[in-house]
Structures are given as C-alpha cells and as structure tokens.
Image (tube, coloured by chain):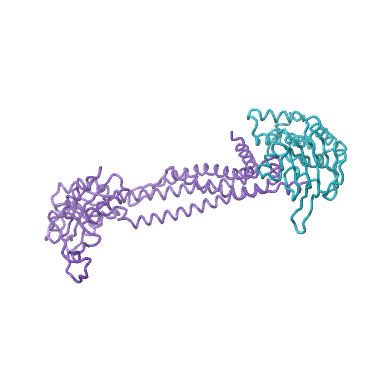
Amino acid sequence: MFERERLVLGIAAKHLAKRRRQTAVAIAGVAIGVGFFLAVSAMMIGSQNDFIQRIINAAPHIIISDEIRSPPPQPAVRALAGTTVEVHGYKTRNEVRGIKDWQEVARAASEIPGSIVAPSLSGAITLRVGGREEPLGIVGVDPAVEQKIANVQENMSAGSLHNLETTQDGVIVGEDLAQELGVRMGDTVGATSRAGTRSLKIVGLFARGRGQFGNNGYVLLREAQSLTAQPFIINRIGVSIPDPYQAEAVAADLEGRFGYKAQSWQERSADFMTLLLTRNVIMYSVVSAILLVASFGIYTAVSNSVVDKRRDIAILRSIGFSESDLQRTFVAEGLILALVGVLAGWGLGFLLMEVLGSIKFPILGRVEHLPLDRSARQFAIASFASLTAATIAAWLPARKAARVDPVEILRGAA
Amino acid sequence: MSARALRRVLPTDPPVTLVHDVDLDISPGRFHAVVGPSGCGKSSLLYLLGLLDRPTSGTIVFQGIETNGLGGDERAQLRLQEFGFVFQFHFLLPEFTALENVLMPIRRLGRLPRSEMADRALTVLDSLDLADQSGKTPDRMSGGERQRVAIARALANDPALVLGDEPTGNLDSENSARVIRIFQRIAHEQGRAVICVTHDPTVAAAADVRIRMLDGAIERIE
C-alpha cells in the first residue's frame, strides 16, 4: 500500500538531503514565520482576552436603564395615525423617571438560569469640603448583590463595599477625587442634592486607573433614593448571566419585552470591540506577509531543485514515471520543507512565549505579566496556513518539472 | 512492435524533419542495431519507438495496441511495464545506491509484494555480476559497473522491449564487449526484443538485424 507515495516521498527527501544549505534556509524561513506568528498572536489574543475579561467582569453584562431608545408616540399622534390630520408642536407629556414596574423586569431577568439581578439607582450630587466643590455621579446599590455582579472589591484600595451596610451615611469614592478634596478614609464630606445638604462619611476608596469605578460614588440604594429625592425609584437594573457572550441576545430580548434600553457589555464597549477588530486585521495581515515570504523560500528551493534535477526528471520519465509522479515528487519537497519548518516553528514559538511570559511589567505599583494566549488554535492556524502556502509555492515549479520534455534533455545529453 | 509511415517533424521555423517514411518491424528474441552517420535520425527514431516522443504522423503498434491513441499516463505505464531504456551515459540517480536504482521501476510498478521487491532487484543485479555492488552509490562504481546497473534497472520489470541509445558509447573495449554479450543474451536467451542505436561497428556486427539510416529515412535493412 502507498508504495508510489512512499517512493515519491523518498526521492523528494533524498533531493533535499543533498542540498543542505538551501533546505536549511527554506526551513528556517518557515520556522521563523511560524514562531513569530505564534508569539505575536499569543500576545495579541492574550491581551485581547484579558481586556474583554476586564470589561465583562467590571460591570453587569447587561444594564437596563430607564431610558427609551426612541420616545413613544404621543397619544394624539397615535390616535390620529393614518388620518389626514398631522399633529405638530404639541407639548410632550412628562414621563416619570425610573423604571416602571421594575420588579416585573427584575423577575423576567432572574428567570434566566444562573443569572444575578441587581437593581440600583444612579443620580448626581455635589460633594463639598471647605470651599471646594466636586460634582459626583452616585450609584445606590445593594452591596451583597453588587459584589456578585461586578468586581467592585478588587478595584478598591481601601475599605470595602460591605462598609456601606455597617456605617451610617457611608460613601465610596475614587482615590483621585478624595485627593482633590483633601479627604481620607473616615473623613466626612458635605453632599448637596435636590433633597438638600447632608453629610457623608468616606468608608472606601477605589484604586486609581480603574475606569468607571473612579468616576462614580457608591452608596446604599436607599441612601441614593433619599439623596436624590426619588423614593422607591429604580432606574438601573444590572443583570449578569452565566455565558457573557449571550449578553447581546438576552439584552435584545429584555428590551423587546419591556421597551427599556437594555445594553449588553458588547454594545457599551462597541468602540473597543472595533479597535480589537482593527488590531486583529493588522495582525493577520502582518502574519500573512511573513508566511508569504516564507513560502517564497520554498518556491526558490523547489524551483532550483527542478532546474538541478532536469536530467533525473528525464531519467524517471524514461523509466515510466508519469507527469503526475514528477509533480507529486516536487510538491512533496515543498511539503517536507514546510512540515519540518512548522515543527521547528512550534518550538521557536514556544520558546518565545516562555521568554515573553517571564517578563515582568510594573504598572501603577503592581507587577504584571504579559497576558499570553497559548491555545492550540494558533498552532493549528499557523500550521494550516504554512502548509497551504507551501503547497501552492511548490506546486508552481512542480508543474514545470512535470512538463519537462525528456527527449529534449536526452538529446542534449547524448 | 511495428512502425508504419513514421514521420517526426520539429515545428520550428523552418520545420526540421527528423524521421520520415519509416516502416519497421521489431521482433522478439532478436537484437536490432540502428546505424548511420551522426544526425541521421537514429536517436529520434528510438525515442519514437520508446514512446518518449510522439510522431507527427504514422503509427506505432505495440502488442496490438495503437500507441498514438494512448494518453501520457498510459504511455508511461507501458514504458514502466514493457520497455527498458539504456543510455550512453549510465543515467543512474546519483543519490541512490545500485539496489535503490534498480528498485525504482519495481516499486513504481508495485506489482510485487514489498518483501519480494528487493529479492527481484538483487536477482537482476546478480545475473549481471553486480551482487557486491548493490549497496554502492554510482560515484563509487566504475563506468562498466554503472552501465550494467543501468541495464539491470532496464530489466527490472521484465520488459518485452529493451532500447539502447549508444549503450557502449562511453565504455572501453572490454566493457563494451561485455555489454554486447549481455544484450545478445537478453535477446536470444530471454526472448526480448532489443533495439540499439549505435556508432560502434562491433555492436552492429553482433546484432541480428542492422537497420541503416540516412537523412531521417531507412536506407536498408540487412
């Protein structure tokens, strides 16, 4: 079985073994291409996954707010729809803020198996210390539920979310804001809002550079309701689901059923997702170029082999080898080069990842390692792309080998 | 094998006629020599008969098959099974040993069980007194040994027709005589048809049939 294939492979391997330098150069080309592809893609995909994970963990997967994407038609417009009367300049009805029947929405969301639902109220107040005033968005939460839905605690440098429950009038603010106001843990600040002026006590601080956490102050839900004079109002429902990648579908479903704007984490970070897509396009372009260059090496090696072996080609044809036998022989040369190159490239890529993985980066006082993605998928992509490129690169000169006219060469040699 | 009204014209400008009006019968068990001055079309005729080249017009019938109608792969298969070529230069594959060279057509044909392939190759090598050369690559053999390995390779698949293109052209008289004796044995004892293009009068003298060519045509057959 496969005698013909073994024979063809044997001839190809012998040809390559005789031309060591060319063979080594072609293999090195593929190996370097594959190795760097693996290292670069491990970094790109690793950082991308890390980034997405941070986005997913930082906040609820879906946020339902009391906003409506397009205002509902006014009763007059609805009543006169389809008639010849057109309504202009009417006075828009004042909608009450907050999610009406939020319990209903929360119940629907909690029916998804494994989901966590966190109702909250956000609003705005002004913090005042001495003569300094700073506006602050506040979020009123239930600490026990909020901790499950967003990794608040990990982003805090002092205190804990739990302190909101144990301390009367507690608030958690960002380190930056605290510094600007000149206050520290345990200090009291004045808070001005629609409901008047109150005193709040700092019971926790968010670490620097943590995006959204630094911009908002966290208080108890009922504290927020009283601070903003919106008793029993909920204007934001956070929902976490077991599979974050289902968020878009779930959000669309909830929005369709209740009409309130439900944003998935994907929608909220659409600009970042576009950025990631651009990054991937750039990476794959660069990597394709590397692999293309590597396949030039194979093309050259096989081309030279065909030119060198014209006499042998004529001999094999006279013995009774067919055109396709010769074609296979030289395609096999390219494939052997690519295969050895891919294996060497795996080794090189693994080595590069080890080196990259061992580098330490101090960021804002914390030591971090490069997030690397070492999934088998990248190895498979690199191998598939290299072998495909090599087959095409070898196929072109191999076709020439198959078309060599044995008579022309035999006549020339005689 | 019989050829009728064989004609081969190179489509150059102006066209060059290599072979014309050739009618020829090649019989099993006989040693045929094709002789004539350089450029008379001897080798061109041999390539046509060996199915390496296609005639411009005329027919070649081999074992009842009209070979013009065969495709490239079928012609290759026929060469593999029924034809054996021996050239002026040994034309062995330099990277392979004598045994591997002889195994090449046997393995390509793939008719024998794998375990018997090497035995077959060794038997053929042994019949040409080459048993002790089987592990050597061509660069470590003498000219006579190489040419005999090439003959062994030509005989590997037990062909009906052996074609020689100046097979003694590069050998001294002792090795030439040896090759001539082998060719006679192949024809007379093994019953194969042998056709040899040659300049060498000793080869011509040893042949059963002498085909004299001049300017692309057969002058006479004796």
At horizontal 75% and vertical 56% (from top left) the residue drawn is: B12
Q: Looking at the picture, tell me which residue is in the foreground, A336 or A367.
A: A336
How many badges with numbers are in the image? Answer: 0
Name, please, the residue furthest toward the front: B64
As drawn, is A60 to the left or to the right of B111?
left
Q: Looking at the picture, tell me which residue is in the foreground, A114 or B60.
A: B60
Chain painted in cyan in the figure: B
Where residue B59 appears, as percent x and y from the top left, is 75, 45
As drawn, is A8 to the left or to the right of A281?
right
Where residue B149 appears, as percent x and y from the top left, is 74, 35
A358 versus B142 height, above or below: below
As drawn, is A343 to the left or to the right of A16?
left
Q: From the image, which quarter does the N terminus of chain A lie in?
A: top right
Name, please, the residue furthest toward the bottom: A89
Where residue B131 appears, as percent x and y from the top left, is 74, 29
Where residue A57 appears, as percent x and y from the top left, is 29, 48
As drawn, is A382 to the left or to the right of A397?
left
Q: Looking at the picture, tell me which residue is in the foreground, A72 or A311.
A: A72
Q: Looking at the picture, tell me which residue is in the foreground, A34 or A128.
A: A34
B180 versus A303 height, above or below: above
Indicate the quadrant where residue A194 lies.
Answer: bottom left
Q: Colour of chain A?
A: purple
